[in-house]
Amino acid sequence: MGAKTRGTEKATIGPMTSRPPYRTISLLDQRSLAPPMHPLGTGGSGYIQDLGTSQPRGSLTDTLGRPLRDLRISVTDRCNFRCSYCMPKEVFDKDYAYLPHSALLSFEEITRIARQCVAHGVQKIRLTGGEPLLRKNLELLIAQLATLRTTEGAPLDITLTTNGSLLARKAQALKDAGLQRVTVSLDGLDDAVFKKMNDVDFPVADVLAGIEAAQAVGLGPIKVNMVVKRGTNDHEIVPMARHFQGTGVVLRFIEYMDVGATNGWRMDEVLPSARVIERLHAELPVVALEASAPGETAQRWGYANAQGQYDPQLGEVGVISSVTQAFCAECNRARLSTEGQLYLCLFASQGHDLRGVVRGSGGDAELADAIAHIWQGRSDRYSLLRASLPPEAQGSGARRVEMSYIGG
């Protein structure tokens, strides 16, 4: 039996123009070949709409007035876990065809794209995967990104999301290279539950050791993300909160999302964040906190003392409610895939080819112009529109980029 195909690329050809043809890349899951929901900021010809040249000024906005502030960079499409909500083993098996090394952006190419995004206003970069620590010599990329400065001259906020499996051995090198913070994915403290969810028999103790190592070298404040799936690990909500309360680690509960087309998502497996807070508050009282930054995805809750007031010594938790309480109106994130496609939404079905621009004959001005046109044409707001979309455009029936390809 031949290898499974990760996706197919299709470059649409439009009429001749003086502007370079920035391609739109469509990712097709073999099992779902429905047309995309919308063209994601491209004209009918497949070219980026002619919005006029826009040199970087640090104030790029999309069609809804949302600025570009956060760039998430996937450095690999591989992972050593097989979490059912992201890379289920029945799809991502030994025959699955991953991207060849020649298709991946080099560290220099990633840094070049990041530099132009920063010139357009990006202040935070998050490295993701797959599992980013599987990318060889990742510290070299972090060191390159750490030299970049915002339009105000400040260092970037450079973070990384990991499953924690390799964190204990790499924490010091990551810190030395310039990484500031890490977010660790952990879906339960019970070994049986966690091993069932990662589906590779990886123990909780090794992830906790990675978190401790990251704390020891100063990669903080650390955040731990728990994807809550009703009927699978929702009984782990309070034990996880008790474990991390008062440790300086911020635990965040994430609603199980309909990302990609392979995770078998169903709405009845979503536990709304409101119910999560109710369960938590019944055991460990919490009070609502203000958002710490514009466009923040998590709603913050602080642990309360005996007087019912927030106690910073006890710490806080967060809930990310992209299914039940969409935050599209303030979304300021773009996602760069491993092979150089720029995605404007976690739920997108199409990306925009920056690798072709980077490897072409044009210079940084052309790259900056391409990024500007892509972002200025952005109108994505899938979570806000989810309820009004037809069934074939929702859940696992929709054609959509996989989370393992562009990170969470």
Image (tube, helix red, strand yellow):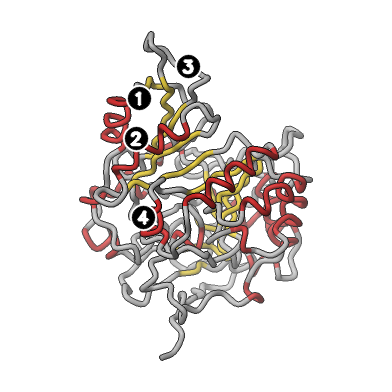
Is residue 401 left or right of 76 when viewed as pictured?
left
Q: Residue furthest bottom?
A: 1
Task: Decide if residue 254 is on the left or right side of residue 358.
Answer: left
- On residue 238, which mark appears? 2
Q: Amino acid at mark 1?
A: Leu
Residue 395: image location, x then y, percent = 28, 58
Asked if residue 92 is positioned above or below residue 190 in the image, the reply reads below
Callout 1 crowding tier (Cα within 10 Å): few <14, some 14–19, many ≥20: some
Alpha carbon of mark 2 to alpha carbon of mark 4: how far? 17 Å
Q: Quadrant of residue 151?
A: top right
Image disc number at residue 284: 1
> Foreground: 198 or 45?
198
Which residue shows up at 66% across the image and 43% down it? 158
- In the foreground, 216 or 227: 216
Amino acid at dot 3: Asp
Q: Neighbour class for label 3 at 10 Å: few (<14), some, many (≥20)?
A: some
State which quadrant residue 309 falls in: top left
Q: Which residue is mark 4?
A: 192
Q: Amino acid at mark 4?
A: Ala
Secondary structure of the residue carrying tag 4 is: helix
Task: Report the disc number at residue 311.
Answer: 3
Query: Is residue 237 among what the camera can see?
Result: yes
